[in-house]
Amino acid sequence: MANYTTADIKALREKTGAGMLDVKKALDEANGDAEKAIEIIRVKGLKGIAKREGRAASAGLIAAKVVDSGNGQVGVLVEINAETDFVAKNQKFLDYAEQVLTAALDSGATDAEALAEVEVDGSTVKELTDGMQAVIGEKIVVRRVGRLEADKIELYLHRTNPDLPAQVGVLVGTDAKAAEVAHDVAMHIAAYSPAYATREDVPAEVVDKERAIAEETTRAEGKPEKAIPKIVEGRLSGFFKENVLVDQAFAKDSKTTVGKVVEATGGFFPIPGNEGDGVSLGDKPKGRKNIGFGYV
């Protein structure tokens, strides 16, 4: 007969975040000793990390924070993935995410690789993550880090499901004047997922490819040779309007653009030198449910 109760199982699940079956097996093996059961869960979990490497971590959350600095404000976004929404809303996972976010903010790390080596209470973020995988029993990945410094930082977090933590996060850096529209711009980014902040941010090879496609399509349609250059440039302009933030029709007023809305404040955005550093604005990667991530 088991020498533990249903209440013991519940308490151990809440303490470790492990599944019911794993908790019961651990309690059986530990003969009802809760502390020994926790150790068993951790050991078995650590042994299973290698087996989880090939599994997909497609759920998760965006952890984010903005703090004042000597030169204005600093904002940080961290995307952390797990395998299921059940884990994504688990309190132990949320507490772990807060630790990782604090480490990112305090260390100045700007990518996941650098953050993995940051020390947290005597261990690294990587070791902290491995320990969380051991307890939770799912693959957990600190996927991306975004850091932005500007006079003013606007943070927008969006829940794609009211029962889950935020899965879309956007940071917008502006000067004091443009800050009055920063929240609306951040919401626009979350909704429309622009790939670039300005036309200057679009790589030359992308522009060349789009121009070539537009020309090939126009010729295939049998348009007059003299009209082709103008039609091609028109189609290229359409590409910019769809993918470049400042050229997109503003979400709250489609008669104007995001760029014009910011310009009307007399301020400026994005802050020079603080563009996305390779992170697409509002990026929603394939295979990771509704995870969105952007900063400009």
Image (cartoon, rainbow, N blue to C red):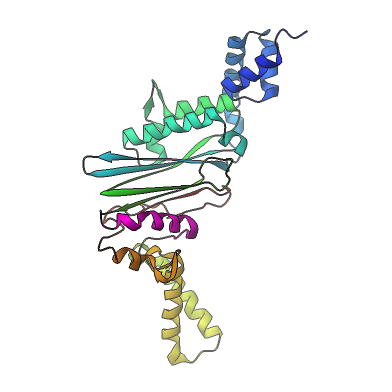
- In magenta segment, residue 179: yes
Observer-nearest residue: 60 or 44? 60
Q: Picture coordinates of residue 143 (x, y %)?
A: 47, 41
Q: Is residue 30 visible?
A: yes
Q: Estimate the x, y position of residue 46 in percent, counting from the top left.
A: 56, 23
The one nearer the camera, 53 or 181, is: 181
210 lies above or below 3 = below
Which stretch is magenta?
177-196
The residue that appears at 41% across and 85% down in the rendered structure is 230
What secondary structure is the stretch in magenta mostly built from? helix
Horizontal relation, residue 177 to residue 38: left or right: left
Residue 276 drawn above or below residue 217: above
Q: Nearer the viewer, residue 56 or 166?
A: 166
User: At x 27% / y 60%, what residue is drawn?
Assistant: 268
Asked if residue 84 shows in the view, the reply is no
- Looking at the rendering, in which quadrant would you find the C terminus? bottom left
Split into 4 quadrants, where in the image is the N terminus? top right
* Quarter assignment of residue 185: bottom left
- Residue placed at 61% from the left, 26% from the top? 48
Q: Residue at x 56, y 85 (%)?
A: 221
Q: Is residue 71 left or right of residue 167?
A: left
> Is residue 201 one of those drawn in magenta?
no
